[in-house]
Amino acid sequence: MMAALFAACEGNDPMRLRDMALLRLLYSAALRRAEACSLDVAHVDFDRRVLSVLRKGRTVRVDVAMAPKLESALRAWLAVRGTDGAELLVNFDPTGKGGRRLTGDGVAAVLRAIGKRAGAWGLDADAPEATRGFLLNHLIAELLPEQSSGYRYSNSDPVTGQAAWYDLRVRVEKAADQSGESAPQFPSLKNVGVKA
């Protein structure tokens, strides 16, 4: 499975380089998404081959060794990103919502987008899951309707943080226009040995 995700990030465009650096931080350095998102460019020390990470529950940063593939991914990303600014992982949201730093929710969105790339799970390039699929979770509002007090409660499971389905009624209707594909679309991936 990891081979398919890494293959989905191969390429030289800025977003794929950022995605590869993110995956390597999560996988090679075993960082939590909040730990990865809190990294600044200054927290990467190529001379000592370490990251200065603020681990969960800690108040002082600790050094985490950089594996060679992580170091390579970070060097490639920083060559394109540059070393100006603070945040290591930046947001590519075209609307500019959420600021420049990639957030934990942004990490989840990036991972969903990587997994949606045709061929990521050994599907045919024209499989409906890759060309016409979408996640219903994206249609569910993150907040419940406003209360009389003006407060809006989160519409999420208290354990997983995922959108809550248990009290939601959904009416699904066939769209009038069936000619298009879901978005975003990414180029099909080469077969990395994952069998359907």
Image (cartoon, rainbow, N blue to C red):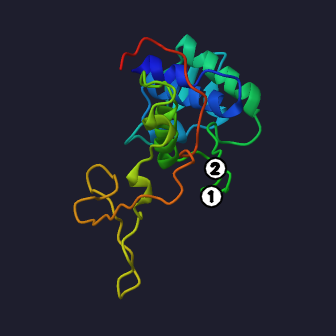
Q: Could you say which is closer to the camera, residue 103 or residue 56?
A: 103
Q: Which quadrant is home to the N terminus?
A: top left
Please name the amino acid that badge 1 sits on: Lys
Quadrant in the picture for residue 55: top left
Q: Which quadrant is home to the C terminus?
A: top left
Q: Mark 2 points at which residue?
A: 93
* Position of 58 relative to 120 (above/below): below
Q: Distance between the residues labelled 2 and 1?
A: 7 Å
| Residue in view at x 63 percent, y 45 percent | 91
* Position of 118 relative to 158 (above/below): above
Q: Give the x, y percent position of residue 150.
A: 41, 84
Q: Which mark is residue 182?
A: none
Q: Could you say which is closer to the camera, residue 65 or residue 131?
A: 131
Q: Can residue 29 be seen in this view?
A: no
Question: On the picture, is 65 further left or further right than 194?
Answer: right
Crowding near pointer 2: few (<14 within 10 Å), some, many (20+)? few
Q: Give the x, y percent position of residue 116.
A: 48, 35
Under circle 1, the secondary element is: loop
| Residue in view at x 39 percent, y 53 percent | 136
Under circle 2, the secondary element is: loop
Question: On the picture, is 150 further left or further right than 41?
Answer: left
Please name the amino acid that badge 2 sits on: Asp
| Residue in view at x 52 percent, y 39 percent | 110
Q: Do the residues labelled 2 and 1 touch (CB within 8 Å)?
A: yes
Q: Name the residue under label 1.
A: 97
* Position of 45 relative to 156 (above/below): above
Question: On the picture, is 88 further left or further right than 152?
Answer: right
| Residue in view at x 39 percent, y 75 percent | 152
Task: Tell how many labels.
Answer: 2
